[in-house]
Image (tube, helix red, strand yellow):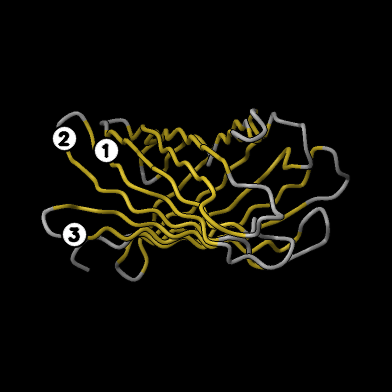
Amino acid sequence: MSFQLQGFHSYNLHNSPEDSSLLQFRAAIPFSLGQTNHIARITIPYITDSANGQSGISDTTLFDLVTFDRRWGRFGVGAVALFPTGEDGLSAEKWALGPAAGFAKQEKWGLWGFFNQNLFTVAGDDDRPDVTLSTLQPVFNYNLGNGWSAGTSEMVFVYDWEAGDFSSLPLGVKLSKLVRGNGLPWQWTLSYEHNFDDDAISAADTVSFTLKLLVPKGV
């Protein structure tokens, strides 16, 4: 299990002189159901500042993957859902659902893999644009020793099928440190990311800080 709090600050926006910031809570819970192993993850974002001056809770996402361990790595398949929990002006006001998949391979030097999510409107406000998004997130982490590691940032590539174009083309790096506190492993991470897509008002340069609590199985 893991529980993490992430803070993002976009000090430079495309097509806007403003900046924006976001706090995000995320929990990943592995569990078994019958003969299958699962991992569920919920993400709840809170926008503390935006280009239009609004703040508040945004939409919640939840996915559940059935996971499989093989000698060549671990993969999972399942579904992801978007819930319109956001406040006025901060929500898509749509319910969305779609397939999700991921792969991860642990190596002696670190970890690599990818995660894919796809969200398509199933219900919601007819006056609002439909959600038709696919995301791809590469994962790369290199062990530096003594609890230190370096790798790619969140780096979520987003493709909007309705617009027929990418809405996020990021490139970023992170530095992490694993420590122990109260008998449990904690990881903090600092990252920087640049988004090369500049067609709309969106983050251009973002720095983030993550504090993650890792809870080993059986604790």
Assign a secondary structure to mark 2: strand
Relative to 140, say whether 121 is above or below: below
Residue at image x 39%, y 57%?
41
**Residue 75 bears which disc, if any?**
1
Query: Which residue is the extreme one toward the left?
Result: 35
The amino acid type of the residue labelled 3 equals Ser
Residue 136 as seen in the image, left or right of residue 164: left
Q: Position of residue 71 (x, y in %)?
A: 15, 31
**Residue in the image at 63% along x and 62% along y:** 58
The secondary structure type at the circle numbered 1 is: strand
Q: Nearer the viewer, residue 78 or 161?
A: 161
Residue 219 location (% of width, % of height): 22, 68
Q: Classify residue 112 by image quadrant.
A: top left
Tell me which amino acid carries mark 1: Phe
75 versus 35 height, above or below: above
- Residue 48: x, y in percent? 71, 64
Report how far apart the C-alphas of labels 3 and 1 lie in the structure. Answer: 15 Å
